[in-house]
Each structure stands twice: as structure tokens, then as C-alpha cells.
Image: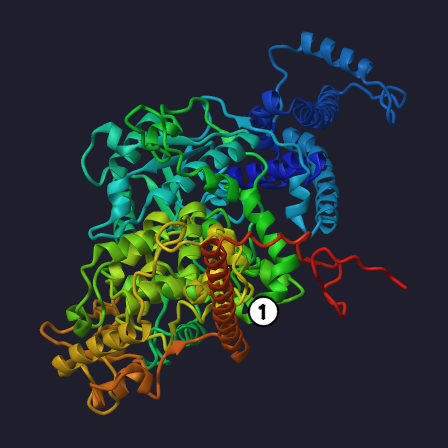
Amino acid sequence: MPTSGEDAAVVRKHLREVLVGREDPEVFFAMCLSILGHQETRLQFLPIIQPLSSGNRSLHSALASIYQEYFTQVDDELELALNLSRLEIQGTPLQKHEVTNGGDTKEVGEACKSRETEHQKGAQLNVSDVTLMVSPMKNMMENSTKVLEEKVLHQKAKRSKNRRQKAAAQQIVGLPCSPSAMPPVLLWFRRDLRLCDNPALISSLEMGAPVIPVFIWSPEEEEGPGITVAMGGACKYWLHQALASFCSSLECIGSRLIFRDTNREGNHIGSTLYTLKELVMETGARTVLANGLYEPWLKERDDMVVSALQKDGIDCKIFHSYCIRDPYSVSTEGVGLRGIGSVSHFMSCCRQNPGSALGTPLDPPVSLPVPYRWPLDVTLDKLGLARMPRRKDGTTIDWAANIRKAWDFSEEGAHARLEAFLHDGVYRYEKESGRADAPNTSSLSPYLHFGQLSPRWLLWDAKGARCRPPKFQRKLAWRDLAYWQLTLFPDLPWESLRPPYKALRWSSNRGHLKAWQRGRTGYPLVDAAMRQLWLTGWMNNYMRHIVASFLIAYLHQPWQEGYRWFQDTLVDADVAIDAMMWQNGGMCGLDHWNFVMHPVDAAMTCDPYGSYVRLWCPELADLPDDLIHKPWKCPASILRRAGVVFGQTYPERIVTDLEERRSQSLQDVTLVRSQHRQYVDKRTGCDLVPMPPRLISEALGLSHDAGGVVPAGKRFLLPVITRMEFKYQLEDPDAVAAANPYNAVLKGYVGRKRDETIAFLNERDFTASVLHEGAQRKERLESDYRRMEGLPRPLAPRGRARRTPNAKERFSIVPGGTVTTSR
């Protein structure tokens, strides 16, 4: 009876367990007998283990010896049974000494040969004789199989529970397959560049066929229909380095990564499907596996690929792993729409409508079966991900040098950073995650974005740590919320969600925008953050809020400009997260943040001692802690000693009256809300947003799967969270921002001591300058008088006033030329 595909897959799965040392070879052989049966094991076992002959000869020899020993013993006993049966048929008496327990069977064999010679023409066995011969053999096989199955159960009970640590210590071996092996599996990598907890990768192994890892670069498809800047310069550079590291990881387990560039192949837009079909034709693959992406345009592309390949008879499967919760499965049923856009509402929806179980993280494989022949590919450099600009003289501008120094781009680097955070920074995260001068955040966002660390693995390890701060775990919920909003509003990266705010009057001053981008605004905290972003491709979440508030509330620049700059310069640039953050910061997202970060006073929270500013703005390093965040208030003497010259060593402030700029921003919002009253709820004063079709279907109880469609021409407006100061300002449009009782500006931990210190230093500096000018004037008058009268110049002092070593002593100034003695 031929072996079924499922049985062969199970056998190959157990073979991998033997390969990594998790299962005994004898146990594996017993499993083959149990699954395939005696005859199929005899026929199929040696071909199954044939790939090991070149990859792991010792294991192949051990399995082959077990096979030989077992079937040699079976053949001897079968020959004995045949001989006995034939002797009985011919009537030859059997002597006791001819066959004994463990005795030799040569005499019986010789007797059988002689009988066969005499009765060569007529000696045949009937069915009953065959049954008689096989029955002892069958009993023997059943007994041996039972013994081996008991050994399997005993061996399984001894397996280690922590497979991740054990797998790291195993010998890594690749399994080349023969030309007659099963058709290979195309494993399509995108933003899942990892071995740990990779569902598509593990599923490809379970198929028992050769695996061909593939990465297809298609920038047009990544960008999508609007201005998303999905792959900015810093993001492309990270992707290049991450792919190089992932290639090394695959080589360590005996495999490699195939690169294809759709642009270089000259095919049409939507060319990923064309490239996959070419790979299918070249390799003979019948299966394509990948992990899902949730940007609407990429989800649409994936659905088209799956449909087209399945029409051609290719099995194509997409696995969920990029988020904790599949954003297309989130429903508001049982929760309602009140508070939509907030993370609390989103978490309530997930609790009320739970999806599939999260499960445990998957172990990384230690080997991959490779194909007999690899398809053609291009080199990683040909993708152009890390292309650097050149000067006119031909030299390269290496703008990513600091990014290389700041990051480890490998999967191992992601796990090392996670371990370091869980052993140190996590204990300060709950209360001090906003500090920019201390490593209190995990800095794992780029690894999550490119799939070098799965969110399930991160959540699992965070829950297993000693300190489990809810704030850190909620960050993963924020990430899923961003993708849910992007699935509801596909134009989130470029179109304001609140219709009135599309008419906001923004500034057209490009000089202000350039100064903000380059970190030359004249506000040290903002400049330090923007310089860190440019040099390392990253800044923590609190600093992102500060620079966003400054750009929008004080420079009156459109939020889209900030979004595009972040997408181009962040190594963790994520379309969903950045679009949601900038929409909310730009006052037109689903959630109005009830705060505006002050560019000066917020420093008392995130950089109270000026360490962060000194690191990224070294020209201000010599200023005192109390004045480093507002150098324009420094006395002239302190600026001279610090070497700070405004307009030369450090830029002048591009805007000076922050309160006036803030009031103007508030009045602009009030103006557009009053002009579009149809989008303001009369009862609550909240803004109204057109509902997306999916939410309307859920609210009306319609199901997309059941064919539910929203009636054409129907329009539904949804009240959303609105900042309290906007509601109050609508009643009194001419009021200044400072008079608004709901003023949203956060001033940080402002202390009176700082203002008193500034006043004291200014007063002291003024008094010292007046006294110094008076003394110089007196010296000039005396010098002029002596010259006019012809008097000699005054004698110069014999010594200069000097301080004693200890300035705290009673007499700290010793007059020049005076000799002191101690008594």
C-alpha cells in the first residue's frame, strides 16, 4: 500500500527531531514502523534518510545500522519459518539438534536446498502454508513494535520543556535533497526577518519538502496609492543591514536567501505576482508561504497573489504574526463606538471579541532542507537599499555612519537589547520612560517593525519578567490600534480624518520647516531631539511628542510635513504608527491628545540636568543646568565664558513669543470649527467624523462575510474625542490661550528656584558690570590727569590679588605684595 502524504510529512517531522537531538534514532525507527507499516518502512526508510548521507554521515550510519539489524533478523527468522514449513510439507523429520534456541540454521538450509533440487518443478506453497509461515513473523513484529512504542513514550516524557535554550546548542546541518524529492516550498519573506517564532517558516518545515527562502523588492507596491513614504532612506538602510544579517542566520542553518528585484526584471506594476510565478516555474514549487502584512494596499496585493496562484494550482497560505491581534478581526460589537480612537476603547473591543488564542512562541529551527538546485537571483547590493549619494568629486557621502555605530541590525541584537531592557530599564519604565537623558526605554521599535522580533515573543518575555509594567505592555496595544485605524481609514497617512481641520490655515514659511528638520530652531531641547533623529534614526516617544507639538502648535506647519520627515529619517518608520501619531498631534485624528508639549518647560521632565542637550548640542555644554534649556536668558558673562554666540555658534530663536503663537493656533482651530458647524455635535461640542463602511456594517449588524452592504447614499457621522479647550474656545473665540481654563500646554516640573536663580544671576551680572565700568572710568580719568600735569605714572602693584587654596576660609582674598605668616 503506497505511503500517504500525511504519513510522509509526519515521518520527516520526526526525522528533524532526531537531527536536532530531541529524539532517539531507535525511537524514530519504531515510529516509522508504527506509521508506515512493516512493508513500507522496508521500502521507504532508506530513501527517507538518504539526504543525511552528505549532511550528517554519523546519524545516517546509525539509522542504517538499525534498519539493517532489524530486517536482517526478520529475514533470518522468515527463512527459518520457510524452511520449517517446507520440511513439514515434504515429510522430512526434524531433529531436535538441528534447530535449537540460538543455534545455527546451516543444516536446515542445506536440507532445504537438496529438497528444492529434487522437487524444483512441483514444490509450491499454498495459502495456508504461507499463513503458517507469516504468523510467527507477525507476532514477533507486533511484540517488537510494542516494545519500541513504549520506549517512544518514555523518551517523550524526558524531553526538555525549554526548547529554545536547547536548540541553540545543537549542531546545525543542512539537508540537501535529491532531484526526486518532493517539490520545494517557496518561503516568501517580507517584514519577518527572523528564525524565532516565525509561523510561515515552521509551517514550511512541517511539509517535509525543500525550502527556498525568497525576498522580493518592489518599491512601487510598498509605497501604496498615496504619499505614504513607506520606505524612507533610514528605513531602507536598516532593511539592507537586516537582510545581510538574516542571510548569515540562514547560512548557519544550511540555507540561503534568494533576492529578486521587480524593477530590474522589467515587468509591469504589480510585479510581485509575476516574480512569484517565475520562481514557481523555475523551481517546480507547488506551495508558497508567507507571513501577513496589514497595510490596506499590501493586504490587497497579497489577496490578489493568493487568488492568482490558487487558480494556477499553487497552494498559497498567509500566516498571522505581525501584530498581537489581526486588525481585520477587531470588532466593536458589545462595546460600541464611544471613545473610539483611544487605546482603552481598543483593548475593550479585543477583550469583548477575542480572536484566536495567542499561543506560545515557536522555537527557531536549527536546519532547513535545501533544494537540489537553487534558482537564479541578484545580489543584495543590486537592490539599491543602501545606496549613498556622491559629491561632484566622486566621493561618497556616508550619512549612515552614526546609524551603524548606534545599532546592531541582527536578530541576535534584538534579543540582546530585549534581555538588557528586562534586566534594567524595565524597572524605571513605568515612571521615567519620558526621560531622554537615561536609557529607560527598550528601543525595540525598529526590530518589531522589520519582524526581527515578534510581538508575541516580546509580550511573552515581558510577562515572564520580574517587573511587568502595564505601561510597557500597553505599547503593543497602541501598535495594534494604529494598524486597526489604518485598516479603517486607508488614507490616514495623507488625509485629515476630521473634515473641518482640512481648512486650517498653515504657515508657508519653509525656513521654519528647514530649521526644525536640521535642529537649528534656537530651542535646545527641540534641536537636540532633531539632531539625534538625524544622526541615529531614532528618538524616544516623549521627545517625538515635543518636536511634533513645536512644529504644529508653535510653527504652524502642517502635520503632513512632520509625518514625511519622520518616515524618511526614522529607522523604525511605520506608516500606521506615524500616521496615527501625527494626525492626533495635528488635532485632526480620532483621538485629540489633551496636551501640548512646551519646548522649554518640558525639559524639566525629560532632561532636568541638561545631559541630553549637552550630548547632542555640544556648543551649549558649558552652560549651567538651570539655563541650558533657555540660553537666551543667560547673562552676557556666562555666554562669554561658555563660548556661545547667538547666530554664530548657536542659532537665534526662529520664533520668540511662544504664548502668542500658541494663541494664534488655538484661534485658527476655533475659526474652522465655527465655519463647519455641521461637523460639530450641538449637544456635546464634539467633532463629528464620517464613519468608515466597516464600522457602519458592524453598527447595523451587517456582516461582510454574509454579503451585508451599507445602503448607497447613506452617510453616518460619528462623535469623537475632542479637546476640552477647543470646546471652551468655541464659546469665546477671542480669548487668549493663557486665559482658557482648559489650557493643554504641559509645562513640566517647573520650580520657582530656577526663576529665582535666573533673576539673581542677572542682577549680579548687572551689578558687576556697573562696578567694573566705574573702576575703568576712574583709571582712565586718573591716567589722563597725570599725563596733563606731567606727573609720573603710578607704581604698579608688586603682586596680584590671589585666592587662597580654600575659598571657604575667613579671608579668601589676599592683597597683592603682602607677606602673611601663620602663628
Q: Position of residue 515 (x, y in %)?
A: 31, 54
Snapshot quadrant of residue 274: top left
Identify the residue at the far left of this view: 713
Q: Secondary structure at mark 1?
A: loop
Q: Is residue 701 visible?
A: no
Q: Is residue 730 above or below residue 694?
A: below
Q: Could you tell me the amino acid type at mark 1?
A: Pro
Q: Nearer the viewer, residue 809 or 530?
A: 809
Whether residue 380 appears in this view of the structure is yes
Single out the residue that lies furthest toward the bottom: 683
Compared with residue 196, is residue 717 higher up or lower down, i.e. above or below? Answer: below
Q: What scheme was used to colour the molecule?
A: rainbow
In the shown orientation, is residue 41 left or right of residue 781? Answer: right
User: Which residue is at 39% across, 43% downward?
Assistant: 289
Task: Point out residue 650 in the picture as x, y percentages from the top left corner.
Answer: 40, 53
Relative image position of residue 381 (x, y in whole percent):
38, 28
Quarter placement of the C terminus: bottom right
Q: Label 1: which residue? A: 469
Q: Along the horizontal axis of the image, is 761 left or right of 461?
A: left
Q: Which of the 4 quarters of the picture holds residue 277?
A: top left
Residue 153 in percent (x, y) is at 71, 49
Q: Residue at x 73, y 36 (%)?
A: 140
Between 132 and 506, the residue placed more toward the observer is: 506
Front residue of 299/442: it is 442
Mark 1 crowd level (few <14, some 14–19, many ≥20, 10 Å Cα): some
Residue at left offset 70%, top offset 33%? 137
In this rendering, position of residue 602 left or right of residue 71: left
